[in-house]
Image (tube, rainbow, N blue to C red):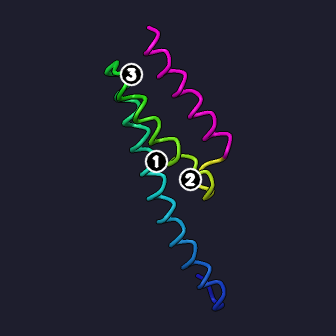
Amino acid sequence: MANTVSAKKSIRQIAHRTSVNLARRSRVRTYLRKVEEAIAAGDHDTANAALKTAEPELMRAVGKGVFHKNTGARTISRLSRRVKALKNG
């Protein structure tokens, strides 16, 4: 158990940051799930629209430190490739 005032404050800060990051991660996953569902349904227009809304959300989470920047870039790249493949095939 923390004894000093600064250690107790640190515990409070960590708990708050954890809850905020969990909410951000959940929000991003919801947007990504919508893209995945549209891809699974084979609907290019819906998938493209969902991707356009998911990308800034994911990049915002990257900027806040919830995800690594390469993880965000890789996820967007893979999703956009799959959405593009829907149009062609």
Secondary structure, magenta segment, majority class: helix
80 to 58, vertically: above or below: above
Placement of 63 over or under 51, stated as above or below? below
Please identify the quarter of the rendering in which residue 39 is found.
Answer: top left
Mark 1 and mark 3 in contact? Answer it, CB < 8 Å: no
The total of numbered circles placed on residues is 3
* Residue under numbered circle 3: 44
**In the rendering, which numbered label is found on residue 60?**
2
The residue at 52%/41% (across/down) is 55
The 10 Å Cα crowd at callout 1, few under 14, some 14 to 19, many 20 or more, is many
- Residue 84 at x, y percent in the picture: 50, 19
Based on the picture, tell me whether residue 79 belongs to the magenta stretch: yes
Magenta part of the protein: which range?
Answer: 69-89
Horizontal side of residue 74 vs 51, given as left or right = right
Q: Amino acid at mark 2?
A: Arg
Residue at numbered disc 1: 28
Which circle, 3 or 2, is nearer the viewer?
A: 3
Looking at the rendering, in which quadrant would you find the N terminus?
bottom right
Image quadrant assignment for residue 32: top left
Q: Amino acid at mark 1?
A: Val
Give, as a three-letter code, the residue at label 3: His
Q: Nearer the viewer, residue 89 or 20?
A: 89
Query: Label 2, label 1: how many angstroms apart (C-alpha)?
Result: 9 Å
User: Which residue is drawn at the image coordinates 56% and 34% (left, top)?
Assistant: 76
Local SS, label 2: helix
Q: Is 62 or 43 nearer to us in this picture? A: 43
Instruction: State which mark lies toward you, 2 or 1.
Output: 2
Please indicate whether residue 1 sits to the left or right of residue 42 in the image.
right
Q: Is residue 50 left or right of residue 58?
A: left
**Residue drawn at the location 49% of the way across and 65% of the way down:** 20
